[in-house]
Image (cartoon, helix red, strand yellow):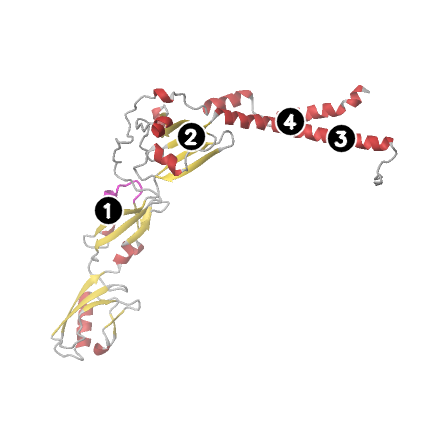
Amino acid sequence: MAPRRFWKVWVALAAVAGSFGGSGCRSAHDLKAERDCCKPPQFNCCTIPDVPVPKELNKVSLPAYIVETPDVLQIEAIRVIPLPPFRLEPLDVLYLSAENDFDQNKLTGLYPVDPDGTINLGPRYGGALRVADMTVEEAQKAIEDKARIKAKNVSVTVSLAQSHGVQQISGQHIVRPDGTVGLGSYGSVYVAGLSLAQVKQAIEAHLSKYLVRPEVSVDVYSYNSKFYYVITDFAGNGEQVTRLPHTGNETVLDAVSLIGGLSAVSSKKIWVARPAPTEAGNDQILPVDWCGITRKGQVKTNYQIMPADRIYILSQPLSKFDTYFARVLSPVQRTLGVALLAGSVNNQFRNNGNNGNVGIVAPIIP
């Protein structure tokens, strides 16, 4: 009878063993290797050496900015003169100057070429005149001939004030995923990995195929490609990664302030992991004395942040132990709860069966 009496206990123990055994197929060797790989660097915050790197009160200017995807460039066209023979197109702007015209509304000023290829000379000179596909000299002759219908002695001088190409070149241009910027009908120019001076040279060299000695100015409108990361360890409950834009002046204290400070489970153990080439062989770890920075105003470890730096904030060991301990006990508690519930239901049915009331609800007599 003893085995029957304790069958529920054996079921509970088997379930507990299954919960531990079925949690994964990794060996103890794999788990140890993972722990060794993620083992935090060992350092004493009170004995951190003074590393000769940029820091608060001793910052450096960053090297020339390198354009990358998806930066936004501000390009302004300074000289846009089409190669001859140039023919007028919509959105070009002509400058007209009339001589021997004594009318108040004389033919002088800027006249844009409308999308239909015409310019509006006003009601005195016959309104619209089609000039598209004409050279500047041909347009001058056509305008002068039409103006002399009303003023026989008028002489008109026509020059190109602005080419329609200016509107395609000037403005904000995002660097595409393939590393190029688009210049409308002038095509694309590869700019990724270049400094601003090199971008200017590349664009002017490309435009020289279509323009006479083109000149542009280039600046960065939006810095979208340089970031650094603040990684917060949540004591075994994952890690939060916050990506922050790099402006060139941040320190460790600035970075932590941008994420709202340390969390409730964060420890004072912080370090900066700086990317290094694979061939370097060693990790670049910069330990941080958080108490020295915040409570004593020390600048020794308040490093200047560089693009792609990783600032890691380790959690408190006791909080991490509490998380792991709760994670181990959780399946045990659930299994024992199910076993106790099953035993309680079994005892209830057994007692009701002995009283002859199986399946019958006993009436309540007041």
Which mark, residue 313? 2
Image height check: is 228 above or below 170?
above
Q: Say which of 135 and 257 sits in front.
A: 257
Q: Mark 3 falls on what kind of element? A: helix
Q: Quadrant of the C terminus?
A: top right
Which mark, residue 342? none
C-alpha distance separating marks 1 and 2: 42 Å
Mark 4 — residue? Answer: 332
Image height check: is 13 above or below 182?
above
**Mark 2 surroundings within 10 Å by alpha-carbon count, few (fewer than 14), some (14 through 19), many (20 or more):** many
Which of the two discs, 3 and 1, labels the residue nearer the N terminus?
Answer: 1
Q: Pointers 3 and 1 in contact (CB under 8 A)? A: no
Residue 24 visible in the snapshot: no
Which mark, residue 200? 1
Which of the two discs, 4 and 2, labels the residue nearer the N terminus?
Answer: 2
- Residue flagged by tag 2: what amino acid is it? Ile
Nearer the observer: mark 3 or 1; the answer is 3
Q: Mark 2 falls on what kind of element? A: strand
| Image coordinates for residue 106, horizontal then vertical, percent | 17, 74
Residue at 48 percent of width and 31 percent of height: 234
Residue at 32 percent of width and 49 percent of height: 181
The residue stretch that appears in magenta: 191-198
**Mark 4 surroundings within 10 Å by alpha-carbon count, few (fewer than 14), some (14 through 19), many (20 or more):** some
C-alpha distance separating marks 1 and 4: 67 Å
